[in-house]
Image (spheres, helix red, strand yellow):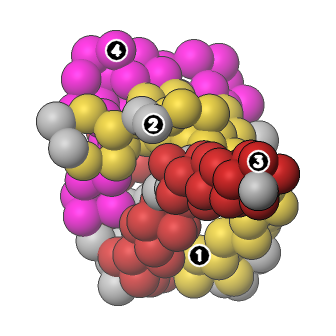
Amino acid sequence: MKKRILLLCLLGSINLCAQTQKTNVPEVLMNMKTQETLWNSGDIKGFMAYYWNSDSLKFIGSKGITYGWQKTLDNYLKGYPTKEAMGILTFTVIEATQLSKTSIYVIGKWELTKDKPVSGHFTLLWKKINNKWVIVSDHTS
């Protein structure tokens, strides 16, 4: 009888642990799909809505670190002045890991299909801030 009770307690605790380890990764991946759609429709400002609107945002690219949401937006607008220059964006997620209730780490590949296709890799740190998942650090190469 004691073994049955112990077994039921063990199974119940395993079930409770599985329920408390709910992942928000699908929500972040859906945000990235929305970003693709916004980019591909020529909406850079909509694409940027998924970045933390803060001077503490970090974007690391081939030219170094850019600090701040506005500066990152300005760089995108300068680098991609037209929808044709933007091309068609595709993300391929290689790994997405929930680090905590408020942090998700995503590694992947990006591709821009256009006259001269370009591609590279990215590492994103998403954080839940004010009940919204946003990118706080983007390392794209």
Q: Which mark is residue 2?
A: 3
Q: Which circle's residue, 4 or 3, is located before the other in the chain?
A: 3
User: In the rendering, at what x and y percent does residue 22 appear?
Assistant: 51, 56
* Label 4–label 2 contact, CB within 8 A: no
* Label 4–label 1 contact, CB within 8 A: no
Image quarter where the N terminus lies is bottom right
Query: What amino acid is found at the position of numbered circle 2 in the picture?
Result: Lys
Q: Which mark is residue 56?
A: 4
Q: Nearer the viewer, mark 4 or mark 3?
A: 3
User: In the rendering, at what x and y percent does residue 69 appear?
Assistant: 29, 31
- 46 lies left or right of 21: left
Distance in Å between CA atoms under marks 1 and 2: 29 Å
Query: What amino acid is found at the position of numbered circle 1 in the picture?
Result: Leu
Judging depth in this view, the residue of 115 and 111 nearest the camera is 111
Question: Residue at horizontal 35%, vertical 85%?
Answer: 41
Query: What amino acid is found at the position of numbered circle 3 in the picture?
Result: Lys
Question: Residue at horizontal 57%, vertical 82%?
Answer: 88
Judging depth in this view, the residue of 38 and 95 nearest the camera is 95
Secondary structure type for disc 2: loop
Query: Residue 62 magenta-drawn?
Result: yes
Q: Which circle's residue, 1 or 2, is located before the other in the chain?
A: 1
Residue of label 2: 101
